[in-house]
Image (cartoon, rainbow, N blue to C red):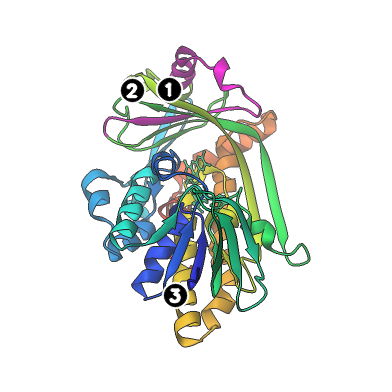
Amino acid sequence: MRTEVAIIGAGPAGLLLSHLLAEQGVESVLIETRSQEYVLSRIRAGILEHSTVQLLDDIGLGTRLHAEGQQHRGIYLQWPEERHNIDFTDLVGRSVWVYGQTEVTKDLVAAREAAGQQIYYEVTDTALHDIESDSPFVTFTDSSGTQVRLDASVVAGCDGSFGPSRAAMPDSVRQVWERTYPYSWLGVLADVAPSTDELIYAWHPDGFAMHSMRSSTVSRLYLQVPNGTDVSTWSDDRIWDALSTRLGHGQDGWELTPGPITEKSVLPMRSYVQTPMRHGRLFLAGDAAHIVPPTGAKGLNLAVADVALLAPALAALLRKNDDTLANSYSDDALRRVWRCTHFSWWMTTMLHTAEDPFDAQLQLSQLRWVASSEAGATGLAENYAGLPIGF
Ligand SMILES: Cc1cc2nc3c(=O)[nH]c(=O)nc-3n(C[C@H](O)[C@H](O)[C@H](O)COP(=O)(O)OP(=O)(O)OC[C@H]3O[C@@H](n4cnc5c(N)ncnc54)[C@H](O)[C@@H]3O)c2cc1C
């Protein structure tokens, strides 16, 4: 089989890349290890920054987002006895949208199916070959057990942190930067209306807590827990008790309404960047090249920003034989990747309780400064609501 761009991974990065390439007349084939049902139901990110929404609008995929998503002007930052609103719209003229990654994926899959996109689900044995030549190829076994060779002009590695693309870069070329954190998130999804109009990020001596949401009837909540936490040790009652304490139930009359928990999982936190994001005819995008802890709500948005740069670069390379953008893709994408890596690290280390009481005083001092200084609040707002694609 032959195509122009072999895309490995049908997550947000791969699906959006195939859509953007098709808009420029470039053909692609997507291959994915999971089933379509699994891809469509995977619960992950939920905050879309300004430029992600703009891009989805520009390509005609913003209709359901605007009908069913919620526009938020900002967030709340809090610590015991204090809650402060950081209004991004006032500070930097941009907002964010609450619209689950699951919904973005549904919209992308529907659009690709309507366009007749070829997507192979439930493939196994994905392997990349000859990426340093002008005729790379990918081999895999399809869902019926047939071995397939997919020849392409370019391979796009959009296969997240567990896919084979990042490791296909030779060791002599690739460089890895990594930070692990001494805590994880216990995330729950609850069938209850959110108790807040905007996300609450709470510093607390017992550990960080966050109140997010997926819709007007579904809440998403997180608790800082030690690494290696067994989710079965957290009963629903224990979760709601800890959330009430850390989020300040009763503070200034605010109440947290509990409800049935429908999903629970523990998410380890790490920062990871692999460079370069291009080697020969292999281009990495999204989680295949970088991971951020979720505190800054950047993972999905970074994947979108990567492919927004990659699609025109590949179109110029394949349609006009112009390699200028392809050659600068890695450096261009990494500028934003490192900015978001720093912002996510900064939010994480400011809000998660450390063992050291000196660190705790520094965190509280930083939080007070961000909440009370226009310069401090503007820095948070600019990064959270998102810098322009190509920044
Ligand atoms: C549990 C979890 C919770 C998260 N929560 C948040 C959050 O709250 N906020 C936030 O901003 N970000 C969050 N993220 C990060 C965000 O979801 C990712 O940054 C985003 O999904 C990146 O999109 P992607 O397309 O690059 O990678 P992915 O979504 O990981 O997609 C990669 C795809 O490649 C496929 N694949 C893997 N291996 C192969 C192979 N060998 N062959 C073919 N296909 C393959 C995978 O099945 C997957 O569909 C979370 C991530 C996880 C894992």
As drawn, 278 above or below 341: below
Measured in 3D between alpha carbons, the distance from the residue under mark 3 to the one under mark 2, in whole angstroms, is 48 Å
Residue 338 visible within the image: no
Which region is colored magenta? Answer: 216-245
Identity, as a three-letter code, of the amino acid under mark 1: Gly
| Residue at (31% x, 47% y) in the render | 73
Could you say where residue 255 lies in the image, as x and y percent from the top left? 33, 20
Could you say where residue 375 lies in the image, as x and y percent from the top left? 46, 54
| Residue at (55% x, 83% y) in the render | 323
Name the secondary structure under disc 1: loop
> Quadrant location of residue 212?
top left
Image disc number at residue 254:
2
**Residue assigned mark 3:** 312
**Residue assigned mark 1:** 248
| Callouts 2 and 1 close, C-beta under 8 Å | yes
Measured in 3D between alpha carbons, the distance from the residue under mark 3 to the one under mark 1, in whole angstroms, is 47 Å
Give the residue at the far right of this rendering: 172
Which one is earlier in the sequence, the residue at label 3 or at label 1? 1
Could you say where residue 334 lies in the image, as x and y percent from the top left? 58, 65
Q: Classify mark 3: residues with Cα within 10 Å, few (<14), some (14-19) or many (20+).
A: some
